[in-house]
Image (spheres, coloured by chain):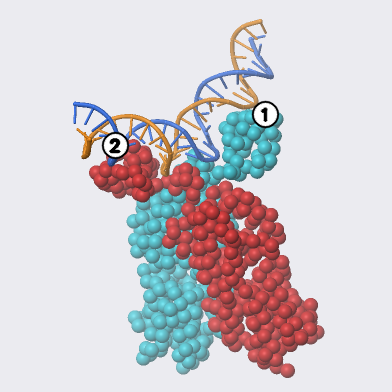
Chain colours: A cyan, B red, C orange, D blue
Amino acid sequence: MAPTLKDVAAYVGVHPSTVSRVLRGKENLKISAKTHDKIIKAVKELNYIPDFTARALRMKKSFTIGLVVPDILNPYFARIARRIEQLGFEKRYTVIVCNTDEDQEKEILYLNQLISRGVDGIILAPVQDSKDHLIDLIEKKIPFVLVDRIFEDFNVDAVITNNAESVIKAVTHLVKLGHSRIAFLRGQKNIYTIKNRLAGYKQALKDFDLKLNENYIVGEGFEFEHGYEATLKLLELPELPTAIVSSGGDLVTLGAIKAILEKGLSIPKDISLIAFFDSLYSPFLSTPLTTITHFRQKIGEKAFKLLLKQIESNKQNSPKTICVDTKFEIRKSTAKPSK
Amino acid sequence: MAPTLKDVAAYVGVHPSTVSRVLRGKENLKISAKTHDKIIKAVKELNYIPDFTARALRMKKSFTIGLVVPDILNPYFARIARRIEQLGFEKRYTVIVCNTDEDQEKEILYLNQLISRGVDGIILAPVQDSKDHLIDLIEKKIPFVLVDRIFEDFNVDAVITNNAESVIKAVTHLVKLGHSRIAFLRGQKNIYTIKNRLAGYKQALKDFDLKLNENYIVGEGFEFEHGYEATLKLLELPELPTAIVSSGGDLVTLGAIKAILEKGLSIPKDISLIAFFDSLYSPFLSTPLTTITHFRQKIGEKAFKLLLKQIESNKQNSPKTICVDTKFEIRKSTAKPSK
DNA sequence: TTATTTTATGCAAACGATTGTTTGTTTCAA
DNA sequence: TTGAAACAAACAATCGTTTGCATAAAATAA
């Protein structure tokens, strides 16, 4: 059996509390140098490792944070997660990763698990069917930070990106190239980011006096298939769009590319494409993609810092929403429309 | 404050142990239907959530497993992680994700953290500088499973892939196309997978009576830059290779592609390329990549099941190494050499 | 020398569950 | 009516720490 505090204490011939005090350091309680050294030595010799569980129970502090995202396979969330884990490591926090698959039920289950496990805080990209369970978190005074997605009139710490503006920039670019039939390939509806991107799209059309064609707005989810199906539908319309803004991320966009190529169309000759996409891969695609790029590590960083501040300060600071800029990177997938 | 067992007990007018027994179910101890119902009702009304920490301490079982990988950003490990998390969820296990960045120090620190936190088991893709700390795990009787990388004469549960053979298949394909100057773009040296892939490479050359050119073996790590630098070096040799086998994964391979294109060479006209690469992106690259594809969810699945078996059975089963096949997928990045 | 402060450590009660053992009731057969 | 068996629930110890408080010993002041 692994040695406990008690074992160490017995070994040195001292009380467990003394060992504990030596190990925890700080404290104004003074320990004589002699016992201090003996204890340190004993800890080494017995190879004592403190039991975090017991400590967490006693101190009501677990040095654990929960990260709840739709899918860690999505490079967008993977990078955020990576950065959070990295910062957590520095501060001796451990990260529990939970994937909701955009399933509200699962989100609630996970959240309860995390609460039950006594995490010190939660970083969450919520499925957005409801926010009732989040109100619960507030009542339970569990620190949490939203990333990527927020709710109207729900004022909590959050890190988001300027979705609408980034799409406006994209559409502007297309319009300047001469496009007027611009389609919007959505990810899943009802997600904050998507709603805002769509709003940006509509705003931009309005700004340029282009009529809004509802048939040009397609897409029902964040998977490869969703992108594929939706784009196929788009390409079977009587009047083809000359450009697509893909707002659903990597998988959706790859699905879209597959559909476009299958239809025998080429990018950007027949169709211009702008996407929210991983900037690592985008330069290397068949046609290097013009993208709206997120600074995902920065998002993770900001989120972690906000959370840590909540955890460490007991007073209730007023909630803060941080908006991280995006970068518009022009590559080869956008060009003048052919006719 | 969140209600505890005691609160529920007091609310019903019963002893905490009774509540516990009702909640845990099973047990041969009988509880009258009446109290049972009252307790269930009280639990609902008070919205009681059991404290996992306390339970873990008492039962010495945390329903937590640690996953230690070099980098979750690497799609290879991301998929494995995803599958493990998924299966864990079904069995009510929670996953703590740790990234080592191929740093032995960090691996040891993490492992100690996990032990300290009382995880029920660990799935580990080890940095391979040493295995001493793993022997520790065995002594402490902490269930663990290696993935992707194993040690010679270290017989523990593990899930690996047939690295050597998959490279032999790749080289064979190249030789049949007429290549004889085939280079090997390594990832980091001294990693089990890489060593085996290299062994496969050498074996294949031997099989085909091709001479081994040490200058054709390059690469010092798993990052984009490593792939880029190494390939550049390769392309500055007096006698250019006509084909490259990239064994370092996505990042290394993208780096290689960048180098090749920068040198004004084209794939596969000037250089054929076969890579270990994410099959999601590979069809969409500038030249769709001929790849050696791993079934990563299967790896994750096997690893989780091995671990679960270890956790659930107290007797020491004899260790098992499972080898998961790879798939060789021919796309457009391989062709006959130009001259 | 005695009183007082300081210093170093021990004591014991938490934290919130689980579980072997006891105790107090019923129930039922003899 | 008594005694044993069966049933329900309480009791109390325990998991490994931390921490407020008490206390003994040593150091200092009076």
In depth, the one of B26 and A238 nearer the eye is B26
Q: Few, some or many C-alpha atoms within 10 Å of disc 2 (few <14, some 14-19, many ≥20)?
A: few
Q: Position of residue A330 (x, y in %)?
A: 56, 79
Name the chain under label 1: A
In the drawing, what numbered circle is on residue B68?
none
C-alpha gap between disc 2 and disc 1: 49 Å
Q: Position of residue A255 (x, y in %)?
A: 47, 80
Q: Depth-wise, is mark 2 or mark 1 nearer the camera? A: 2
In the drawing, what numbered circle is on residue B13?
2
Asked whether, in this view, residue B216 is left or right of residue A40, the answer is right
Tell me where residue A106 sits by quadrant.
Answer: bottom left
Q: Few, some or many C-alpha atoms within 10 Å of disc 1 (few <14, some 14-19, many ≥20)?
A: few
Describe the element under mark 2 as helix, strand or loop.
Answer: loop
The total of numbered circles placed on residues is: 2
Q: Is residue B320 visible?
A: yes
Q: Is residue B241 depicted above or below A67 in this figure?
A: below
Q: Is residue A328 depicted above or below B312 in this figure?
A: below
Give the amino acid type for the residue marked by disc 1 in the picture.
Ser
Give the amino acid type for the residue marked by disc 2 in the picture.
Gly
Q: Which residue is located at x 69 percent, y 77 percent?
A: B200
The quadrant the N terminus of chain B occupies is top left
Q: Which residue is located at x 80 percent, y 84 percent?
A: B238
In the drawing, what numbered circle is on residue A32?
1
Asked whether, in this view, residue A33 is left or right of residue A167, the answer is right
Q: Position of residue A267 (x, y in %)?
A: 51, 87
Q: Is residue C13 depicted above or below A186 in this figure?
A: above
